Amino acid sequence: MKFDNKNWQISFSPQLAILWYSIVAGVLTAGLITIAVLNVESQERLYIDSVTQSSANAIKTLFEADIHKQLTSLNKLVNAAMTDSSISPLLAVPAQMSDQKWTEISQILDDTQSEYHAMVWVDSAFKVGKITSINSSQIVIDSALFTSALKSTEHSSAMKTAVKDSATMIIQLTSTDGTLDLVVYTPVFETAQSSKELAGFIGGVLLLDSYVKKIVPPYLLNEHQFALLIDEQKVYSDIPTDSSMTSTWAKQASFDIGGHKWRIDLAPKNEFLSQTHFHMIKILILLGALLSLFVAVAVYTAMFAANKTNIIKDHRKKTEQLLHNLPGMAYQALNKTDWPMILVSEGCEKLSGFTKLEFEQQKVLWGSIIHPDDYQRVRLAINAAAKLKRVFELEYRIKTKSNEMKLVWEKGESVSSTYNDEVIIEGFISDITSIKQVEADLIDSDAYSETIVNSVVEAVITIDQKGFVKSFNNAAKKMFGYSFNEIKDQAIATLMEKHHADSHDNYLAQYLKTNQAHSIGKGRELVAKRKDGTTFPIHLSVSEFQNNENRMFVGLIRDITQQLASEKQKRLHIEQLAHADRLNALGEMAAGIAHEINQPLTAISLYSQTAKNFCDSEQFEKLPAIFEKMSQHARRAGAVIESMQVMTRQGDRVKEAVSCQLLIDDVIKLAESEARLRDITIHAFVSNKLTSVSVDRVQIQQVILNLLRNGMEAMHAIAYKNGTRITIKAILNTENCVEIAISDTGCGISEEITKKLFTPFLSTKKNGTGIGLSISKRIIEEHGGYINFANNKPAGAVFSFTLPVHEQGVDNEKRNENTYDA
């Protein structure tokens, strides 16, 4: 299964798609069967609901009719008794009525074929006077319990209402044996006049349990559960105590009689539903599941067969297309004389000039186009391979239809026919004429290249991406003292001095990982090691090329021992010329220097005499200022002499690798006292990308210190009106050189002075010697850098100079930013 993010589509493999479609077919079938089952179940539900509702309505009708019958029979009894002159007076005073007479009255009710089990007389005070069983029933009613029930608020209110409305009523009581009784009352009056008075009530008692069983047909209760409610109180139910009526299937029928609401609740029994409805549904669901499974299996089988057929067709088409695109001819041939072809691919025409039809109809036999000189060799090789059932591989010549001679390569094997016992040769034949020609050209080219490489005077060494030597020309053998067999497949670090050998493997691995080159494509100078252990300087340039799937590196190495010796001699000669030039310059400055030295010495003499006079006059408080001025002029004289010494020093300066941060920190410490006296703040900024520089530490510090003092004096000259901050900044510029700049907020330099700023004896200061900047310029240039000037914005001047980066310098690990308050 594949998911396409771009189009939000999911694609399946054919097998998974077949399974998916089969499942869908099964699910659809199951859905249709489910709809059918649900329809059947719905119809059956409607039928059961209809039957249940009809049965409830029938039971309601039976109860309603029978209750009316019981009321009618009781009314007939009262009417008959009231019209009988022998009974009517007794009803007015029932206490005077004998039991025999009450029995006779009760018999009248029995003759009406009512369902009453007993008759009861209740006086106007709701006290039971007479109770008699009828219809051969053995009902026993407790008079006291009966009287207590009648006097209850509910029953007494109902009976009073019945008297007022002249209505018959129905009241349900409980017998002493716990069964439920239904009592039907009708009022009895003393006279028949309009101002009649209530004498009491005659009631008929119905035993609900037996009454219901007699009214409700038994066949209805075989399949249904039945409950009777009067005024929402259940008075009868045939539901077992450990079960309940299923509300889903329950139906109701209600009616009103005598001010009481009767309700019939009827529901199919669980056994009936299980045996008729749910059993049938289960059978239908099982049949549906089996049918769905059958449909899914059938669809899967059909689609699998169709897919397999399509795969076979697709494979055949792909095979034909593959054979068509191959630069050669695939074949099946009988292992007989000249190998008659059974099947060939369309490449046969391009290979031999003969068509596929000509070979398959055996109008042309393959053996007939094989070169006669190669035929026997081919025959023997194929027969031997067929006998041993091995794969054969041959190269031989054929003559095409256009009489062109081609060199072909054939690979095949023998197989047994599936139809008979004949041996069939299957294989592939391709034209290798051009390949053989290319191989020959490559051999010639390789020999030519090797001759050229061995003729150069530089060592040429090839290594693989693991750092192992793969080629070693004659110049390399002579330079390092190894033969090719000695150095072949050895690590290139063998030819390196230890310092470079230790880091080479890590550098090569890092380059292969990141493709960020440090020296590839560039020249660099290293120290190499010969077989005898001696070391010598070399110039190395490395190039990269791709060899098949591997990356290879070619190094061109030149021994620069003689070159470095010549450069050293040349450098020494230049130093001597520079020394002579400095002496000539000193000759030109001699008069000025003498004046500059005499001037501070004269001033010192005058201040000494003044100090003596102050002592004689006991003005000692003025002496510190005089001594400070004397010290300043003494330092000024010392600076002039020091500058002269620097200019006259001969020979190489002692250079060392110095961290830029350390170089600037040392200068700030030298200038800190003077800055503090002038109340100036020195702010230093050193970039975190700086490397170390190779310099004469004292001379460079002298340059920085001279520029710092010039800046502080320029700020002092204008009374620090632009601030008391002077800045030293060291960065790595675009030319990959260290640039150090001193920025002040002093008076600046005019455009006229700028044009001859670094000329000896030119000074903008009142008492300046004018040789500080010229000496600084010479020092920086001798270190391979240059010094510049620019006006600072908004005020002041910026002097900057550059120094070449030390080749093996390392980056500072963090940004250093210090502020010195003086």
Image: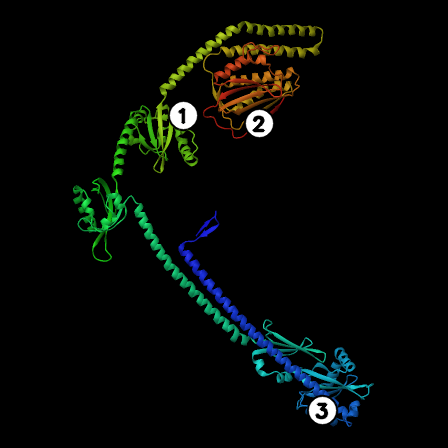
Mark 1 or 3, closer to the camera: 3
The amino acid type, in three-letter code, at marker 3 is Ser
Residue 602 picture location, percent across and down: 61, 5
| Residue that mark 1 sits on | 524
**Left of 551 or right of it: where is 771?**
right
Q: Secondary structure at mark 1?
A: strand
Relative to 98, is 435 on the left or the right?
left
* Residue 74, image x, y percentages: 71, 87
**Neighbour tally class for label 3: few under 14, some 14-19, many 20 plus, Cα within 10 Å:** many
Q: Is residue 160 above or below residue 35?
A: below
Relative vertical location of residue 787 with respect to residue 31 in this rendering, above or below? above
* Observer-nearest of 594 and 534: 594
Q: Nearer the viewer, mark 2 or mark 3?
A: 3
Which SS class for mark 2? Answer: strand
Q: What residue is disc 3 on?
A: 106
Q: Amino acid at mark 1?
A: Arg
Q: Are marks 2 and 1 in contact (CB under 8 Å)?
A: no
Q: Position of residue 586 (x, y in %)?
A: 51, 8
Q: Of the residues shown, which amino acid type is indicated by label 2?
A: Glu
Residue 817 is labelled as 2
- Which of disc 1 and disc 2 is earlier in sequence? 1
Q: Point out the image quarter for the C terminus.
A: top right
